[in-house]
Image (cartoon, rainbow, N blue to C red):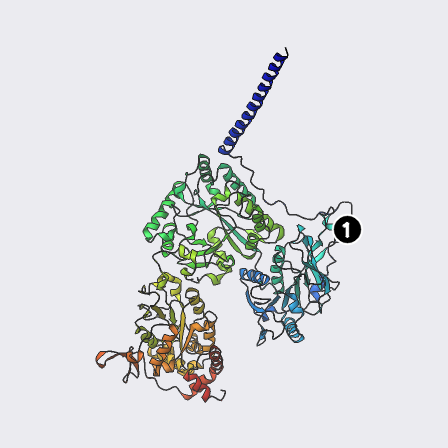
Amino acid sequence: MPGVRKLARAVRQQGLHRLVLALILFCLLSMAYLAYHVSAGPKIKEAPPLPLGDCVAAVPVSGSQRAPLFLPSQVSQRRQSMRTVDTARTEPVVLLFVESIYSQLGQEIVAILESSRFRYHTEIAPAKGDMPPLAWRGRGRYVLIIYENLLKYVNLDSWNRQLLDKYCQDYGVGIIGFYRANENSPSSAQLRGFPLFLRSNLPLWDCRINPAAPLLYITRPSELEPGPLPADNWTTFLSNHSTYEPILLASPRPAEPPTHSVLQRALLATVMQDLGLHDGIQRVLFGGSLSFWLHKLLFVDAVGYLTGRRLSLSLDRFLLVDVDDIFVGKEGTRMKVADVEALLQSQTKLRSLVPNFTFNLGFSGKFFHTGTDEEDEGDDTLLRHRQEFWWFPHMWSHMQPHLFHNVSVLAEQMRLNKQFAQEHGIPTDMGYAVAPHHSGVYPVHSQLYQAWKSVWGITVTSTEEYPHLRPARFRRGFIHNGIQVLPRQTCGLFTHTIFYKDYPGGPQELDKSIRGGELFLTVLLNPVSIFMTHLSNYGNDRLGLYTFESLVKFVQCWTHLRLQTLPPVRLAEKYFRIFPDERDPLWQNPCHDKRHKDIWSKEKTCDRLPKFLVIGPQKTGSTALHAFLSLHPAITASFSSPVTFEEVQFFSGPNYLRGIDWYMDFFPVPSNVSTDFLFEKSANYFDTEVVPKRAAALLPRAKIITILINPADRAYSWYQHQRAHQDPVALNYTFHQVISAGPSSPAALLTLHRRCLQPGYYSTHVEHWLQCYQSNQLLIVDGLQLRSNPAQVMDSVQKFLGVTPFNYTQALTFDESKGFWCQRLDAGRSRCLGKSKGRKYPDMSPESRAFLSEHYREQNVELLRLLKRLGQPLPTWLRDELHNSSWS
């Protein structure tokens, strides 16, 4: 019996072991099966993120009576007691004192000024030394003073402090200052010379805006920004003087998260407005940097308030949201039926906040119905609701236009897209188009503009590439070939940003951009914003809807900005009414920007751009210099123009609007880029104000040659030139009548008066060129020496250009009959300039010469100083003029 029991027990134990092993095996197989189906099966889609909700506001504590949040305001009385200042007595320029050119806060201030298109001048804040000139002839040079470091202003030596304060009092100029505490800053102190006390290095919590602050314009008060403020080194201001009004207030950060209402905690001012009741100067003081987004918003308001709204944009903001790549995209990234319905719902919701808001859809018809079945149904749903949206064409096959060198082939691609639109009922009359990857818009591909106009009748487009992609604050508009090009903005959404949790840097980066960051600032600082988004941003997590619903709500919570949407053609009209100076483009060199070179035709080359310019002025010998330079085997002049002969006159007139393709057609492709020198001569470049900026944008490394003679002789020569060309004004008036004409003279006479005299303001014009080019890029040629000893002058020109030396002594010969130097030919012959050159004129009357000597006296003295500063030799005529004048 015992043996039987042992056997039975052993059998039961083995069965139990088998059962346990079987269960383990079953579990493993089940897990593997489940893992396979989870990974291979359809994923459960997470709900898209919810956009920003209602604005956060402080709620009074029930059952308790609290003290007023802000001190009783006497703003109305204060405004009545403050004197009225004529702000028109100052130039609309900001004087910015920075710690260094590399300081972060200084760069942030500059970024806001540049984004707002406000003019400014930067100076390193002087610890000691002279203040820069603040006024000239009774007019203030600056409408606002900004100190990156408030202490540099407070601790100015008494002379400069009195000088600056007197300027501010006399011209009604305000001051903005920033106090940034560090580890060495005292925890509490009085600001020297002011009834104002500081507490520094404080961590703060829960900030809000004083609705009684006078400077508020864009900023909407009474909203609460809950939670800790960034950094722990805040400075707060305290004063019982009536001149001070707190603007931004916050509470000391508690050791633990607070359990009681913000309304019951102490409030400290981190931004303070000085109404000028203490010393007649209005100021706005910031207890920190611009790293906090509310400081940026209040800084914009401070600039506007202290300048009497002279440096302030209106409250209107125009938004247009482009959705590129409709019907384009790989499977899994396109819109389904539910996504289209969500797009319509979001558009309806946004229209209640932004009048006329409409999504603008850009399509490439070739890719219609190329997704999954669900995505193809999404395509159909878009078309069923096509009248609910605005539409604009991309390319039919989404190819880059700069790859098409033939206008007819490019136009055929557009016709295919237009045919698709007509077959599916998509509107074709919006007048707006966008090129894939902004190709061909800028740098300009002329074939694209031609095809757009012929096929679609396009009058408006947009790009993020003009003048460059970054920094975005420099993006501008322009008009070319009748098509208005508007700046386009990015909003942090690209083709690959389709999931909230996978947003680059984490979803908090997108939220930060919306809530006071880059996207918010784009709307704040730009009256017109066209945002680029993509089809993929409206499927999956629908980040496009989340972004713009949140952005609009945030803007309306914190600002008084009036958001609205206009169709592209009306938007372009609005843009160029606001910024009329941007109508004319400023062409850049495509080869100096890799992105531009990548979207520029491979058939074009920057090697066809000139290496130097001869800029005149007229009647100083520029044609002779052009002829002498053309003798050099390594120097090639531009091709002749049938209208302006040897001059291209690209930078100085309507030819500039033709674009750089037109300009480059005047130059050959050099056989050797490193040794061949292309150049052009246009004598009206010297004194045409827009030319230096235009030339430097396209040819920043070019060298510049100008020729100067006595300005009195130049004026007389121009007058005689006009007489020779039968100008009726020159024929009917004597030279002295022309140069002495008063402001009430006939318009035609004043035109000739200006053309005679203005080019002779040499120091002024040379300074314009030196604002755009380095001094070592400019050569000033003595026109008299060029006439008397051209070989010597040409040696100095060759040295300046860095070309292989050429023997001009052998190449030139003096022609006795002509009276000037000509090209030496074989057998004792010579080739000279045409009959119009070297004319003999009657001598200028002593009366006219005396008049002009006096007229140009100040300019000649300034030229003397300028040449000494540049280290360039004095022309012989200037030396003689100074020697013969009593004012030398």
Residue 251 position within the rendered picture, expressed as x and y whole percent measured from the top left: 71, 53
Q: Amino acid at mark 1?
A: Arg
Quadrant position of residue 25: top right
Residue 55 position within the rendered picture, expressed as x and y whole percent measured from the top left: 64, 47
Q: Secondary structure at mark 1?
A: loop
Residue 477 appears left or right of 789:
right
Task: Please state, as top left, top right, bottom left or bottom right, where the N terminus lies in the image.
Answer: top right
* Label 1: few (<14), some (14–19) or many (≥20) C-alpha neighbours in 10 Å: few
Q: Residue furthest top?
A: 1
Query: How many numbered discs sit on the rendered protein?
Result: 1
Give the residue displayed 32% in from the left and 51% down from the top.
408
Residue 318 position within the rendered picture, expressed as x and y whole percent measured from the top left: 53, 53
Q: Is residue 18 above or below residue 85?
A: above
- Is 67 in front, or is 255? 255
Q: Is residue 113 above or below residue 337?
A: below
Residue 236 position within the rendered picture, expressed as x and y whole percent measured from the top left: 70, 59
Residue 698 appears left or right of 838:
right
Quadrant position of residue 480: bottom left
Quadrant position of residue 795: bottom left
**Does residue 351 appear in this view?**
no
Residue named by callout 1:
66
Give the residue displayed 62% in from the left and 56% down from the top.
292
